[in-house]
Amino acid sequence: MSYTETELKLIKLAADVGAKAAILTMAEKDKIDKKSRKDRKLHNTRMLLDKYRMFNEHIENATYKREQIEAASAINWLNEMYDPNNKADQIVASIMNSVIKTKIMVAHINKMLKIYEIYCSLDKSQKMKRRFEAFNGRYISKNRVRYETVAEKWNVDVRTIQNDVNEAVNDFSSMLFGIDWISKDE
């Protein structure tokens, strides 16, 4: 089948338009995927920080060693361990693995917190000092500090403190995830 010159130009034009549309669609999808990955990392950072106090309690209080169990309970526990129908040994191993993973993550968070504190203090600006204080009070300190309390101390609006915490979480997320946090399009 042969085409006229006009038909060939029309086919070429349609192919060009289709290819450009496909490239734009792929670029848009790539942009959305990158934003989604960043959003997921921010979500994970917030989740880790929200649970930080609980993770510390888990590390300190998880029971997975015989010495941690009272004598009377230990006998029952040992009897259950040797029951072939019981999966207690798998549960104990799971608890122990959970504690190990949690310790590693909390240790990493603690190191990054020290670095972030130094980073904020070296900046010398009141904004960075306030940002670290708000961030630390929100997520790290033994007792959670209310935004209003920090806002009163620094004589700023509560929304400023909320923005400070959001910016601190963004900064801290890049410290937690390292190079994986950086996108070449940012």
Image (spheres, grey):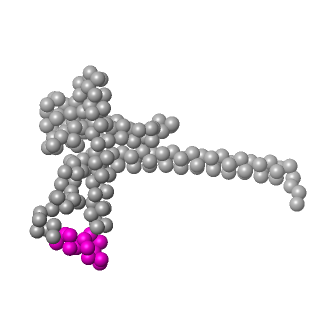
Q: Residue furthest top?
A: 124
> Foreground: 43 or 180?
180
Give the image location of residue 25, x and y in percent.
58, 49
- Is residue 170 visible from the viewing direction of this image? no
| Quadrant housing residue 171 | top left
**Left or right of 59, for residue 32:** right
**Left or right of 137, for residue 20:** right
- State whether residue 124 is above or below residue 68: above
Residue shown at the point (77%, 49%) measured from the top left? 12
> Foreground: 87 or 167?
87
**Left or right of 8, for residue 51:** left
Q: Is residue 180 magenta?
A: no
Q: Residue furthest right?
A: 2
> Foreground: 186 or 108?
108
- State whether residue 37 is above or below residue 79: above
Residue shown at the point (82%, 52%) measured from the top left? 7
Residue shown at the point (35%, 49%) measured from the top left? 44
> Foreground: 2 or 161?
161
Give the image location of residue 24, x and y in percent.
60, 46
Residue shown at the point (15%, 43%) measured from the top left? 142
- State whether residue 49 is above or below residue 153: below
- Is residue 123 visible from the viewing direction of this image? yes
| Quadrant housing residue 112 | top left
Give the image location of residue 85, x and y in percent.
29, 78
Instruction: Give the number of marks.
Output: 0
Give the image location of residue 88, x and y in percent.
26, 69
Q: What stretch is highlighted in magenta?
A: 76-88
Quarter of the image for the N terminus: give it. bottom right
